[in-house]
Every structure is written in structure tokens, then in C-alpha cells.
Image: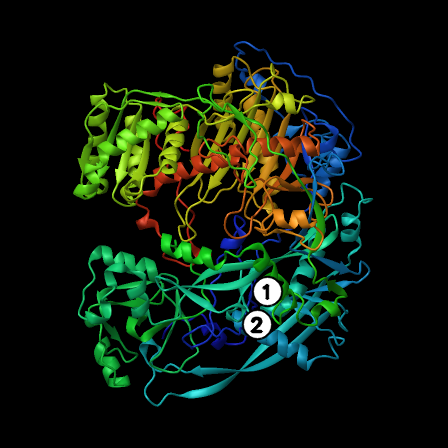
Amino acid sequence: MEETEESNIDRKLTPKARSFRGRTNPHNHQYHHQLLQHSNRIGFGFCYQNQYQTYPALLPLPPTIPLQLTATPPHTRNQCLRSKTHSQKDSWKQNSPPLATSSDTQVSNISTTPAPDVIQQQKNGLPFKGRNGRIVIGTPQLLVVARRPDSGGIEGPSISLLANHFLVQFDPLQRIFQYDVEISPSPSKEIARIIKQKLVEENSITLSGALPAYDGRRNLYSPIEFQNDRLEFYISLPIPTSKPLLPLGETTNTLEKQQQVKLFRINIKLVSKLDGIELSSYLSKEGDDCIPLPQDYLHALDVVLRESPLEKCIPVGRSIYSSSMGGTKEIGGGVVGLRGFFQSLRPTQQGLALNVDFSVTAFHESIGVITYLQKRLDFLHDLPQRKARILMSEEKKEVEKALKNIRVFVCHRETVQRYRVYSLTEDTTEELWFRDRDGENLRLVTYFKNHYNYDIQFRNLPCLQISRSKPCYLPMELCIICEGQKFMGKLSDDQTARILKMGCQRPRERKAIIDGLMAGPAGPTSGNQGKEFKLHVSREMARLNGRILQPPKLKLGNGGHVRDLIPSRQDRQWNLLDSHVFEGTLIERWAIISFGGNSDQKSNIPKFINQLAQRCDQLGIFLNKNTIISPQFEPMQVLNNVALLESKLKKIHRAAFNNLQLLICVMERKHKGYADLKRIAETSVGVVTQCCLYPNLDKLSSQVLANLALKINAKIGGCTVALYNSLPSQIPRLLQHDDPVIFMGADVTHPHPLDDFSPSVAAVVGSMNWPAANKYVSRMRSQTHRQEIIQDLSTMVGEILDDFHQELSKLPKRIIFFRDGVSETQFYKVLQEELQAIRVACSRYPGYKPPITFAVVQKRHHTRLFPNETNNSSSARNQFANENIPPGTVVDTVITHPKEFDFYLCSHWGVKGTSRPTHYHVLWDENQFTSDELQKLVYNLCYTFVRCTKPVSLVPPAYYAHLAAYRGRLYLDRLDYSSLTRTTPILSRAAPPKATPLPKLSENVKKLMFYC
């Protein structure tokens, strides 16, 4: 009998109930993995009535977790109002500071309050156990995340804006009754919602006439208390089945079709009575700073507002999709793009707000498996015409990888059953035999001919194995992919371009789509649940005033005619015509190697060398017109052979007497061997590389050459631009020329969603010059699979501080730390662990306790800002004819956190689509920045990015950390994890193996910006 996802509904009624606690991915809400099943139909006429939703953690901030810090008391802003204020003295030596001894490194632990009894011990000043079981004696201070230092910034002219935040009005006195729901026997996700709907329809009196909201798991929320705290119901549902009589679940032509009535027992128990008083107090400006965000009530409201959309659409993470929102679009490779919307409740300065945004994601196309493979895999493009085709070993691996964990249904008989693909059979369909219930061996192709009068066509292909514990086979040609399954594979460049184009709307169009969603039949305001719970969601976007920060004056090289400038163009870009880079490098020993290319392309290499050298000279960069050896021409196949590639690179390096500064690599096309080339060059050989493609050299322009020159200059040790007015002159209250400051960035990159074993890679970068602060060194480490907390942060920060001291003969007076890639649910854990790690790194130097500012940088959010065309003057409307907000737009009121120190800054010019501002959230601020000071600092830094002549969207330390983490990922990408790929469902997978360490960087490149 076939194992199915729905087979559990045929089990005997038992008191044992299913736990509906869903698995969530805390790392990235938009990549939350949930495969769904429904209709037998081919196509995308989605109208999902009863989907069972697994919610990831809510996007609004988690409760404020008190942190204990028994040493280095912070400044007032980071303390609860009842804490005392302390000042900090800086006591570090300026020349050759000795490393601290082991006794000096006993820095206090930062840990969360474990339990009420421990809190009581702390209040009484009694010893208590800290992290790792260490005993901490004394009364630690209760600390909270940094509070907003003022009422917001004031610098810059005002601009009237709209934000896709919709005010939610709620009655604080409205009680919400939370009930725990147990259903037995365990239903499928689809059936669970049907049961809830029927229960409400048939038991209105017992449920006091309420229309409760159901989260699809164990929680039922009602605005009215039921008649009893404990209720038991029995619900019968007609479940259509085709009762399997034979092996493989196949039935004879006389199918035993029946409407089997299933009886379910539902136990409902009151577990909590919630109200909105705490949430109202949290949102009010007069509320106590130490009140935590009431997550239970907020989650209840979130379930209420999602109830109606979930009845009609496909949920994926915190987004909801439907073909009724603009249809589907093929993006190639058996994948379609589907439009939908994201929604999340957020506490803001204007009150509780619903963030709603347009969203697009990729789904598997609901087509036959054979057609799917034909579209998905290039080597099977002619599969329908070659029915006798046999899969080679590597091809079979690719097919299995493409189909694993996809849900399918069969088309040769009527059934509602769905099957998950676990693997492929070892034997081909032609060779497969099975034993029936009588113990007789049957040949699979004969069985289908006898029972269905169907001749298997693709006999040399394996079958789908749809059970992990016993042989259950389905021929590929009889299977169709169920619709509504999010595509979790890696999209190709072409697919990515198409999906991005689907979601690339100009601001006016995007705003119209969002407004349409709010008023639509499947939007957040559809249905009656809101009225039941006395909720009112505005259909008008939040109105607010932002400010436009002015661009800084920039300093260029002394050799050019133009030596300083203020970016005055609307897009804030500048060009380097008649200008030199601020610091040009001297590149005397370099070489060029070519992979592939036709004869015409290869013949153009000398011309390319000459043009690049000339463009470098125009920019104030010296590039020797003569390479150390003649250009080397290799076939593309060399990139497939790691040992051969390494020998070729080392040969070139030896020709330069092991002192090669630069190797330019020209490739015929993109190739996976790029990762090997970078790893070998930067770890084994010790040379900086710059790769480019022949197609780009065929259309050489001054701009292409300039872009190459800027990247090469930055990698070798130069820099493009500096601030004319240094940071100390702009923020004199905090920064001084003689007291260097270090800017650090950190990021963690995780493996692909379907990869359960590869390590994550963490990177930390730090500025090495002051006051220019435009050169950075990096450190990279692999760590436990999908671990977001940087495990080796203390060591990496310590090494960067050592490098800083070597460069400047001083330790930094202040540390400004930008952390990328953290979701709001992880803020407190990251702060708790990583702030402590930074302090441990500093403690290696006796008495060194610099004030630290720790800010999280977020790009993956759904807040969008639109110019308010009705409120702006005619001159402003003309200025923003592009419709995107201008570079320098900053917002720190209305839609920001009610108490904490955060702001949105759009530092770049949006060329395509709608600009996404970067969200900066300060978790810790011992430097006591004002809003204006920190916003100006971040915006000015965005002009110093070395790869381009325009302000970038992300503060450079975070940007460089992202690039460095990606480079570390490249080092691991070519390792073979295929033997460890997922073969079991998510819920039963084994723990990931120990992280493979990254190869050690060569000393020649370690201190260079090779990653940019």
C-alpha cells in the first residue's frame, strides 16, 4: 500500500491527539519552507479553502529581555529607567599595549534572566548561576536595548511621504480568549480547517455565537468566552477515498469508490484570557520603558487578520499568494512566478500598524513529471522524443535532486491521495518487480498493462520511490506535480531576472497594487473577523514627513584637474572625467590568463591590455603595459580540473618570482570553476585576481574599463574617494582626529534552503585607517550549519584589533559595529552573545574598554516609502518625476519603533522598481549618538564604497562583510556534500556534521580587500 500524507485519516479513532507545532525558520521569513497540496487539476486556478498554516515567528520585536552586565556599566540610554547612570573612563595605552593575561580576561557574562527565582536571587544580591554555569556574585543591572536619544533628527529639508503601513485600531479592553485545540485522530492540514469551519457552523450556541480565528495548529482565538472552559465535540466528515486493494495502492478497473465517513474528536480547553491594555501601554509615549512587547496578544491579532486571506490563498511564510492577484507567469525550467502580498503587524510610533507589501515568489509548475524534467534539466530537453533513454549515474543524481521532496499525484486512477518523492529506484522501470499480498512476484510493467491496460513508455527511467521505509513505486509518466508548492531550488540567472521583473514596479504602480490589495476580496481587510474582535484597519497608507540629508563634499586624487566635488546630480552619482582616484596603486607585476574564447576574442587581448592600462593612467592608477609573461590561453576545460588549474596558476606566479600583484582572468562564460579559481589564488597561490567575461570585452567602453580599474585598484590597496570634510570635523562632539575610531561590519551567509549539511560562513570586517575610514581588512570563519550567532566573533574581532594597532600604533577609541542579516526575532540573542564577544576581544588588552555602538542593518524588510504627490509642491513633484524617493531620504518618526533607536535611510538612487530603504536599528549605544549624528555618519560612509562612484544602499562595513562572507561561501561551494543531501523529511533529519574549516588565506592577500 502506498504511503501518503493523508493516510493517517484512515487510522482508527484513538484518544491520542496530534501536536500541531509547526517548524519555523528563524533566519529568513521570506524563505520559509512550506510545501502545500491540493487539487488534481493541472494549472493554477488557486482557491484554497482549507490550508493549514505554519507561522514563523512574528516580525514585531520580541519581549525586551533584561541583560545582565556586571562589569563596564553602560550609559543611561541602554538602561531601564530605574538604573543608575555611570560614566566610563578610557584606560588603554597608546603604544604597544600588552595583551591581557588570563586573569585579565574575566569579563562579565551577559545573559538573559533564566527564571523568576533567579531574578529574586539577583534582587537580593545573592550569588546566581550565569552562562555556562559560572557563579556571578553581586547585583547585576537590568539593561534594555538602546532607547531613542531624542525626538528624531532635524537636519535636512522636509519631504512629504507615504509608507505602506496601515494603522490598526483596537480596543484595549476587548478580551481575547485563547483555547487549546486537540483533534484526534490526527487530520491532514487541509482537513483540520474543514473541521474548524464545520465545528463553528454546527455549534454556534455552545460557542456563544462567536466566529473564532484558528491558527491551523493548536490555537483558537475567540472574542467571546465559550459556555464552558472545556468542551468536547465529535465532527464527522465525508472523506472521498479509493480503497487500495493491491500493492502500490493501485486498484482494479472496478474501483471501490466510496464516501467514507470519518469521525473526529475535538477537545477545546481555555488556556488564557488576553487583553490589549499592555499593548496599548507599550505603544504609548508615556508607558514604562521596561514594559515588554505582549507577544501573545499581538500573535492573536495577527491570527485574526490572516484568517480570511488564508481561506482563499496559498500561505508561504508571512506572505500569501493567489493566481487571482495577477495570474501566473512561466519563468522557465518548470517554474512559475506567482504574485501575492506580505503582511505583518508592527508596533510603531503612530500605534499598531499593519505592514502590507506586494510580493512575488517562484512555485513548481503543476505539470507531468516527464514534462517537468524536460523543462528543468537541459540534458533531458529531448526526453519525450527519446523514450528509450537511459540515465547515466550523474544524470540520475541530478534528476533525484530535482524531484526530491516534491509532492505529486497520479493520473491513471481517481484518488485524492498525495505522495512525497523521497528518491528514485535503483532499477529501471523495466526491471522492477514487487510482491503482492499473496506473495506472488509481479513485474511492474506487466501489472500496469493487466490492471490499467496501460503500456509504460519510459521503461528505462527509474520510478519514483514515495516511501522512506518500504518499496512503493510510481512510474514517472503517471505522476503530476501538485500545485501550490514553493520552489526551493536555486534559480538560474534567467529565472532570477524574470522573477525580479515580475516584482519590479515603479513606485506609483506598486502603491496602486498595495491599495488594491487592501480593498480586495482576499486582502487583510476582507472577512468579518476584524469586526468580531473590534479591529479596524485603515485602508490609507501612513502619512509622514521625512528629511533629505545633503550629500558630503568628496576629495579626489591630487593628480587630476578636479580634486574635490559635491555630487549635485539628482541621483548623487559623480564621474571621474578629468579626475584621479583618491589613492592610486602601482601595479608593475601582473599577468593575464584566458579560459576559452574564439580566435577573434583571443586576438583582442593585446588591445584590451593597452586600453585598460590607458584608462588606469587616466584615473591615477599605474598599470604596467607589459605583463610579466605573455598572455596565457587555456581551454575552458581547465576550470573543471582543480589540480591542473592550480598548477597553471602557480606556474604564472613563479614566473613573477612569487611576487605577482595581480592576475586578470578572462572567461568565455560563467563557470562553476570560478569558485575554485578564487580559492586557489587567494589561499594556495597568494595572488589577487580580477575576473571578466569575453562578451563584456567585445563591447569595451570607457565605463567598463573604469569599473574594472576601480575594482583592481581597491583590491591592490588603493581607494576611490575620501570625504573632504573628515568625520571628526562633521561630528566633533564624539570624534577627534587623534582618537581613531574603528567601523566594523559582520554578516553570516547560510547554505541553500535545500542544503541540510553545509556550514554557514561568518565574516567580520574592520576599517584600518583614520579619519578616512575607507580601507577594510576581513576575517572569515565557517560555523555550524544555519547558526546565526557568530561563534568565533571574539577571535575575529581580536585579530582585527591587532591589525588596527599595527597600522595606527593605537587601539580604537570607539567601536561602531554594524551587524547585517539579523531578523527582529533574533535581536536580543545576537546582542546578548555578540556584544559579550566584542568585550572579550577588547579584554585581551588590559584596561581597554572602548564604548561600543552595536547597530543591526536590515535590507530584507517590507517597508516602502512613496513621495506623497498631493502634499509636495509643484517643484518637488517635478523633482521626483522619477517617483522614487531621492538619495538621503531618512525617516525616524511615525513608522519607526515607539521607543527604540531606529531609522530608515534610503542612501541610493532607485534606477529600477521601487527603492527599498535600509533599516538601521541601534541595539546598544555607549557612544550616545544623537539621531542627526548617526544618520549623517551612516549616509556619509555610503559615499566611500570603493567599487563605484555613487552612494550605495548599505553602509560599507556591512556591505563589505556581506561580500567577504560570500567569498567564504565560494571556498566551500565546490566541496562534495552530495552524500549528505536530504533523504528524509525535515522533521526527522539528522544533526548537521561539524563545520568544515575554511582554507587559510595567504599572507599576501590577507590584509587586502580581495573580496570586493
User: As shown in the figure, which amino acid type bears the numbered disc 1?
Assistant: Arg
The answer to whether residue 282 is left or right of residue 685 is: right
**Camera-side residue of 276 and 146:** 146
> Horizontal and vertical percent for residue 97?
54, 12
Q: Are marks 2 and 1 in contact (CB under 8 Å)?
A: no
Helix, strand or loop for disc 2? loop
Position of residue 570 measured from the top left corner of the image (x, y, whole percent)? 57, 41
Answer left or right for 411 relative to 500.
Answer: left
Q: Tell me the crowding category of disc 1: few under 14, some 14 to 19, or many 20 or more residues within 10 angstroms, Cα based.
A: many
Q: Viewer-proximal residue, 434 or 47?
A: 47
Q: Does residue 443 appear in the picture of this structure?
A: no
Q: Which residue is mark 1?
A: 217
| Quadrant in the rendering for residue 379 | bottom left
Identify the residue at horizontal 24%, vertical 58% (top origin).
Answer: 395
Q: Could you tell which of marks 2 and 1 lies nearer the N-terminus?
A: 1
Callout 2 amino acid? Lys
Q: Is residue 677 left or right of residue 830?
A: left
Q: Residue at x 66, y 60 (%)?
A: 302
| Colour pattern of the rendering | rainbow
Where does the image place residue 350, in percent across and percent down from the top left?
75, 51
Q: Is residue 590 above or below residue 633?
A: above
Q: How many marks?
A: 2
